[in-house]
Amino acid sequence: MGFREEARSWLEANCPDSMRTAGYGTDGGRRATLNPDTRLWLDRAAQRGWTAPTWPKEYGGGGLNNDEYRILIEEMRRLNARTPLSGHGVSMIGPAILEFGTHDQCLEHLPKIASGAIKWCQGYSEPGAGSDLASLQTRAVENGDDYIINGSKIWTSGADRADWIFALVRTDPNASKHEGISFIIFDMQTPGVTVTPIDLISGASDFCQTFFDDVRVSKRNLLDAPGNGWTVGRRLMQYERSSIGGSGGARQKIKTVDEYAKTYVGIADGKISDETIRRDVVSLRMDELAYQLTLQRNTEEASTTKAAGFMSSMFKLYGTEQNIRRQDLTVSIMGTQGLGWSGDGFEAPDLNATRGWLRSKANSIEGGSSEVMRNIVAKRILGLPE
């Protein structure tokens, strides 16, 4: 039996029907809060190694090569199967540990990530160091076999629900601002860690501010050498941007735009009745298809050992700007129904669309602003002068 037939047979037998719908599974941690089918799908995929398909089997992955991984993704899309595990663990810190961590660190952390046992958050941005991340001031001072950490981070997504955090800290205040930074990971239950959610315009609070007051962390939790945090941190951002730009939910979102057009604009002679809306939906469809094909080509051309590179910035830029465009079009199609916040005159899909539109405004900032991504594309991909 070839790998495609093997993958298809396994998915058909193991993916619950309720997980064959638009959406995602889980981002790890707090398994008791998961519904039974989500937990079942996570457990089955993790046991197979397909929550982290290309990671080595000894670290909880599936050990798939690039061709096998591509086939698996195709077969999951055929079923419309949800990704069983997403989030910072598998898309960001996991690949960074795999690249920079010791064998012992890989054994300690990667199986827990692949099984969905823990949820991670990111400690990068600070109130006084946003776009100029290298100016961060959170300090980690040596104290025997430990570091004592003091400072704060902002926009730490999901910190109020996270089990562990990966953070950039300044370990050498006398070095240049890039060379004095180290990359460290630690448990969010460590004494001295305090989290405060931040209310967003969309009504959610998935961003937080996180405070560190004399937080004691073992030196063995340092990833790579002291002072090499900027190198690790930049590589992790490339993994993050690849994840943001390469999100597999685009096709499902296109269907949603079509559904809104049919509901709020209407159909005539088998077509969306408003010519302008019809043109905009078709244009979005074409751009999304071209984007998906480009992502697929990039995956096929990459080797199994190749780390995320500067192309991740291009995918992050296009993917997030495309999502903003999609959300804008959805609300435009809905007319006044796209401006509802509460009340009897609005159905749940109306309110979700409004909040999704508002939430999308952060897409051009998070994970690296669109302006920064354009600079990277210009310098690192197109080779334009500084």
Image (spheres, grey):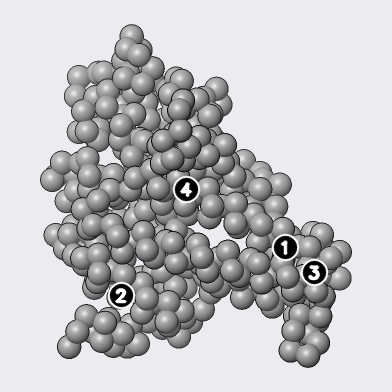
Q: Label 4 neighbourhood size at 10 Å, few (<14), some (14-19), many (20+)?
A: many
Labels 4 & 2 near each other (Cβ < 8 A):
no
**Left or right of 87, for residue 278:** right
Which is nearer the eye, 89 or 178? 178
Badge 1 marks a residue whose secondary structure is helix
Mark closest to the chain's N terminus, 1 or 4: 4
The residue type indicated by label 4 comes to Met
Compute the Cα span from label 3 to label 1. 11 Å
Q: Earlier in the sequence, mark 2 or mark 1?
A: 2
Q: What residue type is labelled 3?
A: Thr
Q: Earlier in the sequence, mark 3 or mark 4?
A: 3
SS class, disc 3: helix
Residue at image mark 1: 329
Q: Name the residue under label 2.
A: 71
The vertical placement of 285 against 377, above or below, is: below
Judged by depth in the image, the label closer to the viewer, 3 or 2, is 3
Q: Marks 4/2: CA distance? A: 24 Å
**Numbered tag placed on residue 314 in the rendering:** 4
Q: Which amino acid does label 1 sit on?
A: Leu
- Contact? badges 2 and 1 (CB < 8 Å): no
Tell me the distance, in whole angstroms, between the alpha carbons under discs 1 and 4: 22 Å
Locate residue 66, reporting x and y percent: 25, 64
Q: Is mark 2 on a helix, strand or loop?
A: helix
Instruction: Tell me the crowding category of disc 2: few under 14, some 14 to 19, or many 20 or more residues within 10 angstroms, Cα based.
Output: some
Residue 276 — which label? 3
Label 3 – label 4 distance at C-alpha: 29 Å
